[in-house]
Image: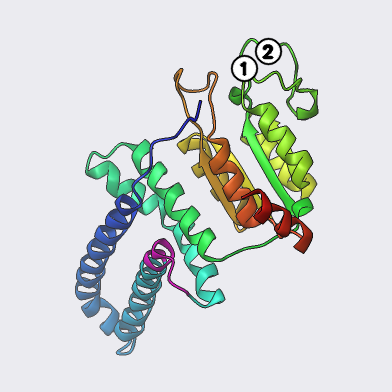
Amino acid sequence: MDFKAEKPKKRLFIELISGSYVAMLLTFGVVWYIAWPGLNNINEYLPYMFAIVLCAMLFLMGFGIVGMVFGILGWPLPAIFKRQTYSLLNMLFYVVLASGKLLGIKRRKIESSFVAVSNAIVANRHIKVPADRLLVVTPHCLQLATCPHKITRDPNNCKRCGGCNIGDLVTMAEEMGFHFFVVTGGTLARQMVRDIRPKAVVAIACERDLTSGIQDVYPLPTMGIMNIRPNGPCFNTKVNVAEFRRVIEEIIDLPESGKSDQKKEN
């Protein structure tokens, strides 16, 4: 059965961050206007210095929004701009979250949109890493709940019975050579990052865990794949294996022979 996750709306995050930008623009203007007399009494140049600081903050935020839009559309950006955009995306998440809360938008929708925007920005950077420098982590709820085999830390204990997607991912890890671990939570995932020291991470999880994971391992580029929950959260979840393979193949820097073999298979 081909499981597919609900497609998140990237525009939600962009709309919220753009609205936050307009609100900050108005707020900074009011703050500067109120503070101007007091600052001027201290030093005649102080109001202008304060204005420069506020404008610089607004410029960086506006630059980040433009970079996010470029990333979503797949338009080219200089490498330095790509890194800065990714940084600002993670920094401004809580601003967007606060805006969404004021508007009554569910946190899950915002997190889902954040992951989608983050994926688009990382994809636009066209990052390529050797297979042995890629870390893939998945939640333990991807394993069939009734399975007696413990695969946390050692997914090779999987018997590949086909009852869940773990066997597919273990087989793919053996074929392609990336590091693959099943973790019980964020603490173990962070430990794996410290131990492996990868150049990129691919994670399968729910919106909440992907959002926190992306921010925890920042500045490492991370691609997030939403798990599928036909039985509710944290129980016998699934992953779209075809989507997972596509993401992995886009990140791994395959040798020429491997690329030729893949073309033949396709």
**Residue located at (62% from left, 22% from top):** 164
Quadrant of residue 67 within the rendered picture:
bottom left
Q: Nearer the viewer, residue 106 or 39?
A: 106
240 sits left or right of 163 in the view: left
| Vertical placement of residue 213 versus 138, above or below | below
Circle 1: residue type: Leu
Residue depicted at x 58% and y 42%: 244
Q: Is residue 167 magenta?
A: no
Mark 2 near mark 1, Cβ–Cβ under 8 Å? Answer: yes
Residue 211: x %, y % from top left: 49, 44
Which residue in the structure is indicated by mark 1? 144
- Kindly tell me whether residue 216 is visible in this rendering: no
Circle 2 SS class: loop
Q: State the extent of the magenta-drawn residues as a range.
A: 68-76
- Give the distance between the C-alpha atoms of the residues marked 2 and 1, in whole angstroms: 5 Å
Depicted 128 relative to depicted 169: above or below? below
The residue sitting at the front extreme is: 264
* Residue located beneath label 2 in the image: 147
